[in-house]
Amino acid sequence: MTLFVLFVLIPIVQSGVFSLYKWDGFGPPTNYLGLGNYKTLLNTKIFQSSLIHSFTIMSLSLSIQLPLALALALLVGRGKLRGKRVFRAILFIPYVFSEVITGIIWRYVLTPGPGLANLVLGTLIPGFKPIAWLAEPNVVLYAYFAVLTWKYFGFHMILYMAGLQAIPADLEDAARVDGANERHVLQYITLPMLGSTVRLTVFLSVLGSFQQFVLVWVLTQGGPSNASEVIATYLYKYGIQRFMLGYGSTVAVVLFAITLVFSLGYQRIIMKQDFAVGKAT
């Protein structure tokens, strides 16, 4: 509790106080602005773009990354596939890499011209023209999401596989004996009983989407022309690098408010039944 108060609660309160001042980090804050930083922030187009980009990453994660992880978990965990353990290890390896190492690897893969991605696609697709994956404003955000998916889908896959192991195989077999096909078994038995795990991965994916920093910074630093700017990189650029710590604290408070509101609302509304089952157990 002491560590939590010192390194979590007190910094949060201090950020809230500093966000009311124009402060460069040197000496005590004296230039009081009230809500001036918040008005400036909400009217800044770059911040608005970073907010949209964070929501875009969140939407893509929920619609592509998690279904992909679930499909692979079903294939490796339930499918009749030889060498399941080998596939499981291979698919989980990207999550073991640090975000810095992942970013460095994919900067090479996505290098314009002779990059590995262009070489592979040029071999597979006749007439393919090389793409500057990290330099095209209309492409860079999706290229970053591809890297993010490669990095984290193994983590969600392992969670789904753990959830699948808790589902009695006899229950699924009984449904098949009663005439249910594989689609019905998946729709009416497997997925509903996997609901608590799915809700957990959605919770983690949404929070992770808003807190992304290292991978974006290593790959693009928010560029080109702020096309891959997210809230955390905007905070670092305009709060830390430019010694605008009062303004940066404002960004931090807004980010904290977004994640806090989502966390409390999601747990109370969506995950409420999971907590009730846990207490009953």
Image (tube, grey):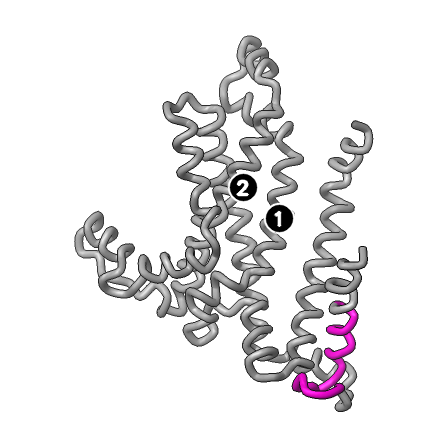
Seen in the picture, residue 129 relative to 85 is either above or below; the reply is below
Position of residue 191 measured from the top left corner of the image (x, y, whole percent)? 59, 30
Q: Residues within 10 Å of mark 2 (few under 14, many from 20)?
A: many
* Picture residue at 47% right of the left edge, 74% below the top: 226
Seen in the picture, residue 240 relative to 201 is either above or below; the reply is below
Please identify the quarter of the rendering in which residue 19 is found.
bottom right
Position of residue 124 measured from the top left corner of the image (x, y, whole percent)? 21, 48
Q: Residues within 10 Å of mark 1 (few under 14, many from 20)?
A: few
Please identify the quarter of the rendering in which residue 237 is found.
bottom right
Magenta residues? 12-28
**Residue found at the far bottom of this picture:** 31
**Residue found at the far top of this picture:** 177
Give the quadrant of the C terminus. Answer: top right
Residue position for label 2: 156
Query: Do residues under tags 1 and 2 come within 8 Å of each other at their CB atoms?
Result: yes
Task: Tell me the element at label 1.
Answer: helix
Position of residue 48 measured from the top left corner of the image (x, y, whole percent)? 58, 72
* Picture residue at 59% right of the left edge, 13% below the top: 170
Residue in front for this viewpoint, 245 or 273: 245
Compute the Cα span from label 1 to label 2.
9 Å
Q: Is residue 39 left or right of residue 211?
A: right
Task: Tell me the element at label 2.
Answer: helix
Q: Is residue 22 magenta?
A: yes
Q: Is residue 97 left or right of residue 110?
A: right
Residue position for label 1: 204
Seen in the picture, residue 138 relative to 94 is either above or below; the reply is below
Q: Which mark is residue 161?
A: none
Position of residue 217 measured from the top left corner of the image (x, y, whole percent)? 48, 67
* Amino acid at dot 2: His
* Amino acid at dot 1: Leu
